[in-house]
Amino acid sequence: MNPSTSALLTDLYELTMAQAYLEQGMTGPAVFEFFVRKLPANRNFLVAAGLEQVLSYLADLHVTQEELVWLERSGRFGSGFLRDMETLRFTGDVDAMSEGTVFFPHEPILRVTAPLPQAQLVESRVMNLLNFQTMVASKAARSVLVAGGKPLIDFGLRRAHGAEAGLLAARASYLSGFAGTATVLAGKVFGIPLYGTMAHSFVQAHEDECLAFEHFAKAHPENVVLLIDTYDTEAAAQKVVWLAPKLTARGMSVKGVRLDSGDLADHARRVRRILDEGGLSQTEILASGNLDEYRLRDLVNNDAPIDSFAVGTAMTTSSDAPSLDCAYKLQEYAGRPTRKRSEGKATWPGRKQAYRYYTADARLSHDIVTTDRDRRPGEPLLRSVMKEGRRLELAPDLSETRQYAAAQLRQLPESLRALEIGPSYDVQISQDLQSLAQEVDRSL
Amino acid sequence: MNPSTSALLTDLYELTMAQAYLEQGMTGPAVFEFFVRKLPANRNFLVAAGLEQVLSYLADLHVTQEELVWLERSGRFGSGFLRDMETLRFTGDVDAMSEGTVFFPHEPILRVTAPLPQAQLVESRVMNLLNFQTMVASKAARSVLVAGGKPLIDFGLRRAHGAEAGLLAARASYLSGFAGTATVLAGKVFGIPLYGTMAHSFVQAHEDECLAFEHFAKAHPENVVLLIDTYDTEAAAQKVVWLAPKLTARGMSVKGVRLDSGDLADHARRVRRILDEGGLSQTEILASGNLDEYRLRDLVNNDAPIDSFAVGTAMTTSSDAPSLDCAYKLQEYAGRPTRKRSEGKATWPGRKQAYRYYTADARLSHDIVTTDRDRRPGEPLLRSVMKEGRRLELAPDLSETRQYAAAQLRQLPESLRALEIGPSYDVQISQDLQSLAQEVDRSL
């Protein structure tokens, strides 16, 4: 049982509604859009991510025989519906922002146009995929922006929320500019560069710390990164200096040491001095341990002699904003624009497009959200990526997406690049869209 | 590719260290324990969960041929190690607290005793599974404690962190006393009762709200729960009253209505009055929309006429504490107790047991954490669940685990049942364990 690919990874009401739609012959084209209502408290912008997994899910959507039998035995569904489920495929269209695109509230990042029962049925998983990767990519981008070009590595698998979260957090953070991950499966599945050092247990398993370092070097002569904080950080750095010539004599060198506890800046300075005085000026320092973008910024701004950083839990779980206030809403059915008017949750109706405008120095100036029919000059952010259930192009290489995301981050105005929250980015709702909303309201 | 079952869902350093251990012949018995260092800010206790998934993972651990080929091509590993990986199985022992057990910092909830390379290799996934489900079960228990017996339903899939998180959050919350979930796959895989209503899109897809209600009732005559806040909550409640006799004439009844926005207590009172005056006193009110344990408590304490609650994002993501400060640490290797002494992260060495003691009125009094050899009266919380890679008993039925967790919550003293943080529960470190720590320190 693979939860990532099961059509039953959905909310019961999606099936319930699909059955009602099918019974009533309500299979006309429905338009749903995924968007974020408002930014989390500590975000100036978001980075779109998860589209590739959504497209794979839609292209592969089907109910297995075993699932059909279970649905039938549940007694909840009629035979007509079960027959429809047996042949279920996604035959709709998808328009979306490219992964890595910077976006803001009210801007759809994905639009599904499909027969109503299909477009409804996929809601839960589409949201599940876009919410998570977008959240992580957005959090990771903040670390990238303050790291001053120093490599960041994802160490978050152990506290990610389950298997898929660990795998996809590696992807989303790489997309946003992380240098790589420790998660082996992410290397295999997505080709993301892998990094790793050693655990405290490796040192503890040996009666002598120096012997542990030597054994590790012998096993991995090309990647000797030694964890030095198990007992006494500076004493261990001295052991590294003592050991280095012995390793050099055997053709190995200590590529780096890792700090994982205590005052990282302070330890880094002491360790740097010990290494330099011991002739190991080429040996780099990697720091880890409860890092987030704020601690990273402090370390970088204080010129702590740290060469690279491993970021785990805070990034993988987007700890200060572990969800987005996102929605997947019906905007049009059978040609009729619709709108939800629930208190505090009203939405803009109809098929929409977001246009982006730039300043003279190529920074983001403002966006305009408008109806899809209201063609404008400016850069349209949504483009067609799937037609009648088929992808229009091959999945872009993840490294290309990563370059695109980096270019997006370069275009951010300084106020949005800061960790602190500045004035909101200017997202305008066009006159055409406002008129449509009034029209819909009048018709209700 | 199923990330939930892949042996490569691990950190690179687990493989790196395993190779070094195997090269050095360090395959003696290692003892690792999983525990939490300190409680999250808003928790008085934790509920152990995830053991079943850990045991399944260990029992099934293997590297596929395709994974072997990839490992080989990566160029990181020697042929000896690859041969070892080809025949990798978990042959160790596991001692653990039963799922649903209330526990506190410093108490191991799981102990792995296995040849060092195996015990090391499984670290990342064991932590990933125990951290997540324990975190969710602990968050969910807080809602259960304030709900006053009213049913709670998991609606969190869409903002759970990926597929497995959605599935396992349904399990962890059910274990802690939720009545069920909307996640269909959790019904299929774990037999958890399923609940569902309708989405706003269902109302929007119809030109007339009343017609939407009628169509929904017709499709699901046994479970007519109508969402009434799409446009105007009270107006929709009036429509339900108008519609009800027509449905009754056709043998259907409106089981409930759902509120999802605005001031839920206020709407519930108005809607209750409308329903009662319309002869629908049997029609229940379900409330949802950004609920967490604090809002639940307010609604329950204010006697809002709400019969059941759906809880989503806050529970699924454990939004106020989206990770635990947990660790999986080497406590003994080849008969020698070990201890990490990193600043702020020191651990108690050796194989441990936690004993629980009760007050005269059967509430928790205090726990004692001691060495495994220090047998005591009192209730030992860890028991043997796997020997040489084989489970010692069948997986308990999830409903039994749920009853056990409910009994655990009943045994909590009042100060720990409160949402606010009271004095810490008394967890004593035995003299025997303190002596062992001193011994280990002397030997370093």
Image: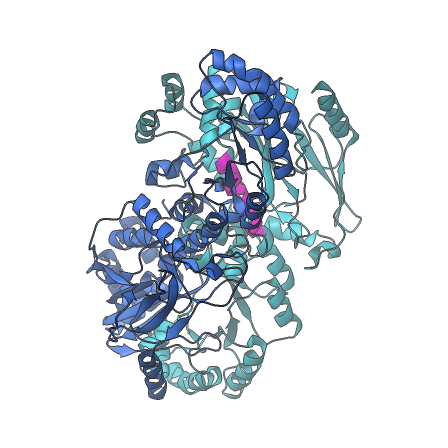
Chain colours: A blue, B cyan
Could you tell me which residue is drawn at 19 percent across and 55 percent down? Answer: A392
Could you tell me which residue is drawn at 37 percent across and 55 percent down? Answer: A408
Q: Residue furthest front?
A: A360
Q: From the viewer's perspective, is residue B62 above or below residue A377?
A: above
In magenta stretch: residue B133: yes
Q: From the viewer's perspective, is residue A84 above or below residue A232?
A: below
Q: Nearer the viewer, residue B142 or B79?
A: B79
Asked if residue A55 lies left or right of residue A292, the reply is left
Q: Nearer the viewer, residue B104 or A281?
A: A281
Q: How many marks?
A: 0
- Magenta stretch? B124-137
In magenta stretch: residue B136: yes
Res A10 visible: no
**Which image quarter: residue A383?**
bottom left
Q: Nearer the viewer, residue A429 or A306?
A: A306
Q: From the viewer's perspective, is residue A379 above or below residue A188?
A: below
Quarter in which the C terminus of chain A is drawn: bottom left
Residue B427 place in picture, x, y as percent: 74, 41
Could you tell me which residue is drawn at 19 percent across and 60 percent down? Answer: A388
Quarter in which the N terminus of chain A is drawn: top left
Res A233 visible: yes
**Which image quarter: residue A123?**
bottom left
**Which image quarter: residue B232?**
bottom left
Asked if residue A386 lies left or right of residue B307, the reply is left
Q: From the viewer's perspective, is residue A57 above or below residue A155?
A: below
Residue A364 place in picture, x, y as percent: 38, 63
**Dominant SS in magenta:** helix
Residue A49 place in picture, x, y as percent: 37, 54
Residue A296 place in picture, x, y as percent: 55, 45
